[in-house]
Structure formats: structure tokens, C-alpha cells
Amino acid sequence: PRFWAGTVLLALLFSWSFFNRPRVFRIIAAALTAVVLLVFPYSDYFRYSQREAVDVVSLTEQLTSNMDYDSFQQMQTGVDYVEKSGFSPSEALGPLVFMVPRSVWPEKPQALGITLAQHAGYEFWNLSAPLWIESYTWAGFPAVVAVFLLLGAAGRRMDDIRERLPEKQATMAFLLVPAFAFYL
């Protein structure tokens, strides 16, 4: 929920023309980076009514042991998973058509984050699988390169379309381009 709320709020904020200025963007980007690295890790304290003592740890330990930042660990687990199980190109359809319910598609691939958590023997399965490792499990580095070239081309195309629009014209592109950027 925090991720989705942040994506929506940042997309709305950066759709406002005031934030399109380079200096303002740099200041906001630096502030957001500080918030993500320094505030976000400790924001769990306010999520629950029963609070535990705050255990202050170094930033390095926070990024490597807290499952809010599981991407690195999941990527390492993904490489190990591919070494043991091989590539699985059929899994590529899962993220592309995630909205299809299992009642319609019973053989739909399981989310890779769960598969990797099970492979690693974790008891906690609510983990992510970054697109880097998702595409790597499909066909290795060529798949990673292809996916990110396509993603970059799509982002560039959306940005070009948004730039050609008149400044005052309210269209979906004014919301979709920042949403796409912050989602990534």
C-alpha cells in the first residue's frame, strides 16, 4: 500500500508544471532519496498499534537485512534458482497477463517472488521479484537486455508524446508519464 500510494502521489505531484523545472526537480529528487533511505525504514514503527522498541541499525544493515529492501537478496536467490532449475521462458506470460484470474487460467505461473522465497526456504513469502531477475529467469542476460530496451523505448515514446502536447491541455499523458517513471 505504501508503494502504490507513493506512486500515485508522486505522479500527481510531478504532473503539476511547477515541478517540471530542472532546479525544483533536483531538489525534490534529493529530498525523496533522503526520505526513502532515512525515513522509510523506520516508518514501520507507526504502522501498528502495539509498538516494539526501535532497534537502530546501520544503513548498510537496514538495506541488507530488512525485507522492505529485498531486491538484492531476491536477485541473488534468482540466480541460484536458475542454476538449479534452468530457465523458464513459459513464465514470461505471468507478469504480462497478471490480471487473468486463476479460475480462468488454472496453470497461470505463480509470482516469481513467492517461488524464490520458497526456493530459499523462507517462511515469509510476501517478497518482490524485480523485473531484472524476472526477465533473467526467462532466458538469461539476452532477455534482460531485450526487456529493458523495450521498456526504455516505450518510456521514450511516452515522453515524446507528452512533450508534444500543449502545456495547458489536460490529457492522460500528463498523468501516465510521471506514473510510469515513479512506478519503475
Image (tube, rainbow, N blue to C red):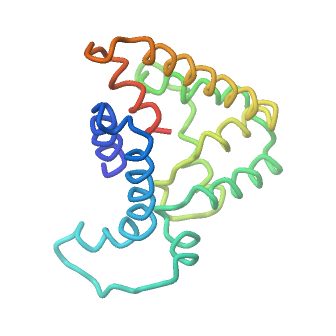
Q: Going 63% across and 59% down the picture, which residue do you hit?
A: 72
Q: Is residue 139 left or right of residue 183?
A: right
When the figure is inspected, residue 85 is found, relative to residue 126, above or below; the finding is above
In the picture, residue 149 is in which quadrant? top right
Q: Going 53% across and 40% down the picture, which residue do you hit?
A: 111
Depth check: give the residue in front, 44 or 82: 44
Q: Going 37% across and 18% down the picture, which residue do you hit?
A: 173
Q: Position of residue 109 (x, y in %)?
A: 57, 32
Numbered marks: total:
0
Q: Position of residue 45 (x, y in %)?
A: 28, 74
Q: Going 38% across and 24% down the picture, which residue do you hit?
A: 176
Q: Is residue 13 left or right of residue 112?
A: left
When the figure is inspected, residue 99 is found, relative to residue 53, above or below; the finding is above
Q: Position of residue 86 (x, y in %)?
A: 81, 41
Depth check: give the residue in front, 34 or 126: 34
Q: Is residue 159 left or right of residue 135?
A: left
Considering every residue shown, the one lying at the far left of the view is 49
In the picture, residue 87 is in which quadrant? top right
Q: Is residue 40 left or right of residue 151?
A: left
Depth check: give the residue in front, 163 or 93: 163
Q: Position of residue 8 (x, y in %)?
A: 30, 38
Depth check: give the residue in front, 92 or 57: 57
